[in-house]
Amino acid sequence: MKINHDYAQLKDNNLVCAPNILYDGEVQIINASAEKYAEHGYFPIERTTQPEAEGFYFTPVYTEQNGRIVEGWEQHEIPDTATEAEKATAFDILMGVSE
């Protein structure tokens, strides 16, 4: 199933992107309007620029605000005692790389 990365809903504080095709009963809705996505519980995502700070990494957090989902960022300090592997993992998270 293909997904639409412009609309989503929050489930247990996790972003769940909308499908490209919505269904009303047995009717397929292709290229749904914002109103139709909202009827199905999906809202537009407002993306923000990930901050950068030396010695920190950031993870996205999402909140519903006025009929949209807003992306924010949670800052995490990279401990000085982190091993090189932990620092590499934090860097991968920062860069959006997953295994």
Image: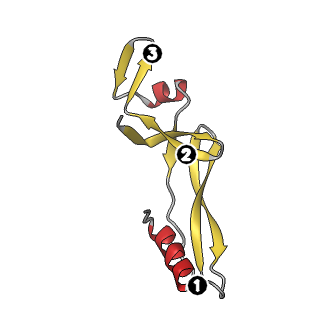
Element type at marker 1?
Answer: loop
Element type at marker 2?
Answer: strand
Query: Could you tell me which residue is drawn at 62 percent across and 39 percent down?
Result: 11
Q: Which residue is mark 3?
A: 24
* 28 on left or right of 14: left
Q: Which residue is mark 1?
A: 83
Give whichever of 96, 86 is nearer the camera.
86
Q: Amino acid at mark 1?
A: Thr
| Residue placed furthest toward the top | 26
Q: Amino acid at mark 2?
A: Leu
Q: Amino acid at mark 3?
A: Asp
Contact between labelled residues 3 and 2, with CB atoms less than 8 Å apart: no
- In the image, residue 52 sits, relative to residue 34, either above or below, namely below
Q: For residue 4, which quarter of the picture?
A: top left
- In the image, residue 71 sits, relative to residue 59, either above or below, namely above
Chain-order first, disc 2 or disc 1: 2
Q: CA distance from mark 2 to mark 1?
A: 30 Å
Residue 10 in percent (x, y) is at 60, 41
Q: CA distance from mark 3 to mark 1?
A: 52 Å
- Look at the image and tell me in which quarter the C terminus lies: bottom left
Assess disc 3: are there few (<14), some (14-19) or many (≥20) residues with their C-alpha within 10 Å of its C-alpha.
few
Q: Which residue is mark 2?
A: 15
